[in-house]
Image: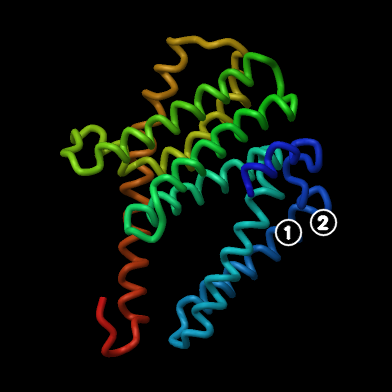
Amino acid sequence: MLSAASVTAGVVLPASALSGLVGTGPLIVCASVVMGLAICCASAGSPVFRGFGSVLGGVLALVLVPFNGTVPLWEGLVILAVMFLGTAAYRAEHGQSTWRCTAGAAGLVVVCAVGSVYWSGTDTPFARRGWITGFLLAALTFALGLASRGRRVPQVLTALGTISYSVYLVHPVLLAVIDGTIGRRRQDSLVLEVAFVGALLPLCLLTHRCVEAPSQAWGRRLAARLQPPGTGR
């Protein structure tokens, strides 16, 4: 449903639509309050409060990702569709669904994602080709990883997977810094791409070790303290 909606969503709302509607400041305050409430409820001992907190956090994500992302609405919906596609693969892996249904959903997401780029008229043909190429390569990488999940993974790939979330968060910041200093070329340059990756990966390794890993450890300790007595891990 999300991938199908993305095909026509590009002409409905611009990027950061909620910020433009209510203002960035009020939106940050409102989202922070809702997120704090969701975290507190999800950490409570009552199953009712935990369920409410989980739903509230999910609703917040479903609102912010498509309606206030830095990308157009159609791209936000594609992101959500891909995320839920991972859930579909997880359910098929654990016998809660069939691989045939998952493969059909994956095909629909890919077709709608590619169609969304052309339907929305995004940027230049060069930008459209770059987006489609990146998306298809990401889908291929996921498929290869899923097919080889029972085999030994090279250590370099494991390391890249470990810092992948930091890469996801840091790379747009680094691009913004480049845009604000030397500017971004409109055509590919292998030298600049290698330099970008060479700067990005050490930076992401640093943020993983100094920010992400300590935060995860703190979260596990907090969860252990909040765990109801007599409940197994």
**As drawn, which residue projects farthest toward the right?**
21
Q: Is residue 61 above or below residue 105?
A: below
Q: How many marks?
A: 2
Residue 205 on image: x %, y %: 33, 39
- For image coordinates 68% across by 41% down, the residue present is 6
Which structural element holds mark 1? helix
Frontmost residue, 127 versus 188? 127
Residue 178 sits in quarter = top right
- For image coordinates 44% across by 33% down, the residue present is 139
Q: Is residue 20 left or right of residue 69?
A: right
- Residues tagged 2 and 1 counted as in contact (Cβ below 8 A): yes
**As drawn, which residue projects farthest toward the left?**
152
Residue 95 on image: x %, y %: 34, 58
Sort mark 2 into few (<14), some (14-19) or many (20+) by Cα contacts within 10 Å. few
- For image coordinates 52% across by 77% down, the residue present is 51
Frontmost residue, 215 versus 56? 56
Q: Is residue 173 visible?
A: no
Numbered label attached to residue 85: none
The CA distance from mark 2 to mark 1 is: 7 Å
Q: Amino acid at mark 2?
A: Val
Sort mark 1 into few (<14), some (14-19) or many (20+) by Cα contacts within 10 Å. some
Task: Return the residue at label 2.
Answer: 22
Q: Amino acid at mark 1?
A: Leu
- For image coordinates 40% across by 30% down, the residue present is 140
Residue 58 on image: x %, y %: 57, 63
- Mark toward the start of the polypeptide (2 vs 1): 2
Residue 22 sits in quarter = bottom right
* Screen quadrant of the C terminus: bottom left
Task: Return the residue at label 1.
Answer: 27
Which structural element holds mark 2? helix
Q: Is residue 127 visible?
A: yes
